[in-house]
Amino acid sequence: MEDKHADGITFRINAPVATSTFIQLLYSSTLAERRPVEDRACIDSMLTNSNLVVSAWQGDELVGIARSVTDFHYACYLSDLAVASSQQKGGIGRKLLALTQQQLGPHCKLILISAPDANRYYPALGFTHNDRCWVMNPEQVIAAEKPA
């Protein structure tokens, strides 16, 4: 699906995105600070294994992306929402999220972990804060035994 807007931005659902193009957007959006951009194989796998990718293009330039992993019916984990800094505050992120949500079933929750600077952005869109999120970094392992 392709959706063109008067401002010259074209939105696409599950259109191919080259790894180098994605990395370039991560840098231009400041999301590269929290993504393994130096590990091209990892970034490539992040794209390849996502089953819902909504992208925003200005001509041939990727200016925004919403990358998710979902079952389409119960939970959609939005792994990345990135908009080029030069394009922020123009509604691209909001449209990426709306198009992502439109691909989901009527009972599917949209779940994400916010970048620190974006904590004020999501409530304005209707997201509610949930303090029950838990994260385990890759260098940590599941405790083998129940603590005493």
Image (cartoon, rainbow, N blue to C red):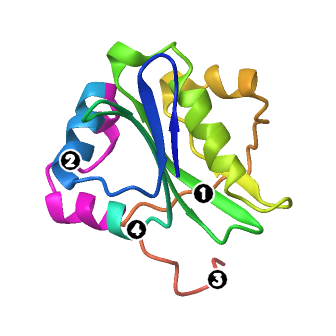
Q: CA distance from mark 4 to mark 2?
A: 21 Å
Choose between 140 and 33: the one closer to the eye.
Answer: 33
**Which of the numbered marks, if any, corresponds to residue 146?**
3
Between circles 4 and 1, the one closer to the viewer is 1
Q: Nearer the viewer, mark 2 or mark 3?
A: 2
Question: Where is 66 relative to 49, above or below?
Answer: above
Q: Earlier in the sequence, mark 4 or mark 2?
A: 2
Nearest to viewer (mark 4 / mark 2): 2
Helix, strand, or loop for circle 4?
Answer: loop
Residue 77: mark: 1
Query: Is 58 displayed left or right of 12 in the figure?
Result: left
> Which numbered disc covers residue 37?
2
Badge 2 amino acid = Val
Residue at disc 3, secondary structure? loop
**Which residue is rendered at x = 25% and y = 51% of the image?**
36
Give the residue pinned by disc 4: 140
Q: Secondary structure at mark 2?
A: loop
The amino acid on which the numbered mark 4 sits, given as a three-letter code, is: Gln
Q: Sequence order check: which comes first, mark 2 or mark 3?
A: 2
Q: Which residues are magenta?
A: 29-46
